[in-house]
Amino acid sequence: MYNWQFHIIADYWPVFLRGAIVTLEITLAATILGLVIGLPAGIARMSRSPYVRMPVSVYVEFFRATPALVQIVWIYYCFPILFGFQLEAKTALIVALGIHSGAYIAEIVRAGVNAVDKGQFMAARSIGMPHLMALRRIILPQALQKMIPPFINEFANLMKLSTLGAIIAVYELLQESNNLIATTYRPLETYTFLALVFFAITFPWIWISRRLEHRLQRHA
């Protein structure tokens, strides 16, 4: 019978707190970068011009079809070979996760816009409203309501993906936990507590997303 000793791990709570703060910083920064990339990419993917639509579609499909871990390692190790300068590990992780998230956010935007009744867009165009103005004033405000729940889910997903930063020695929650195991020799307690910490910081976002989704469905 295994002798659990969580009191040993509890003495190191500042380690988990430090890791949690770094994880949240990475997640927030990557989410902002993902929105900056994904919002225009989602609009561009619906363009009638193949010269606009096709490159964006290649980006979206490529980054959705390849593992985030490979993208992180490529940006951290291959970037300096190609461009001659090294990104700091935390910066490389944020850039990789932001680009990865941007591909998913682009799909969220496209799905949200397509979910709005096309008759409203046609009505706006029939009264002489330009294409972009109709999109900005009529379609996007309605689509945004449908996008919020999946945006929150993407934020929670990025929080979990941030653990991949341990592979390039970013001191987020997983890396801090690995260092703690080397000190305490208590891997079961450490990883169990780590799982509980992640549950505590991600589940509220998932719950909020579900509540918003149910509310939007009731008012649909």
Image: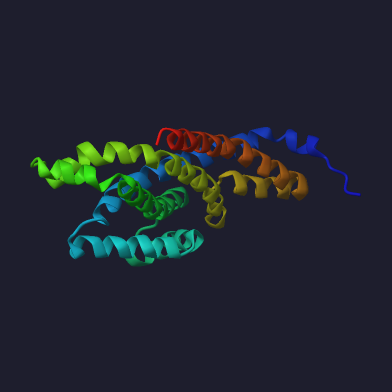
Quadrant of res 63:
bottom left
Residue 141 in sight from this viewpoint: yes
Residue beneath the point at 34% across and 66% down: 82
Query: Which residue extends farthest left?
Result: 128
From the top left corner, tell me how far across and down residue 19 is, in percent: 58, 40
Q: Is residue 131 left or right of residue 209?
A: left
- From the viewer's side, name the closer residue of 85 and 141: 141
24 sits to left or right of 51: right
Name the residue nearer the viewer: 65 or 127. 127
User: For residue 11, which quarter of the picture?
Assistant: top right
Q: Residue furthest right?
A: 1
Q: Give x and y (percent) for residue 163.
A: 56, 50
Colouring method of the image: rainbow
* One can see residue 83 in this view: no
On the image, which quarter does residue 84 sit in?
bottom left
Quick check: 98 above or below 209? below
| Quadrant of the snapshot with the C terminus | top left
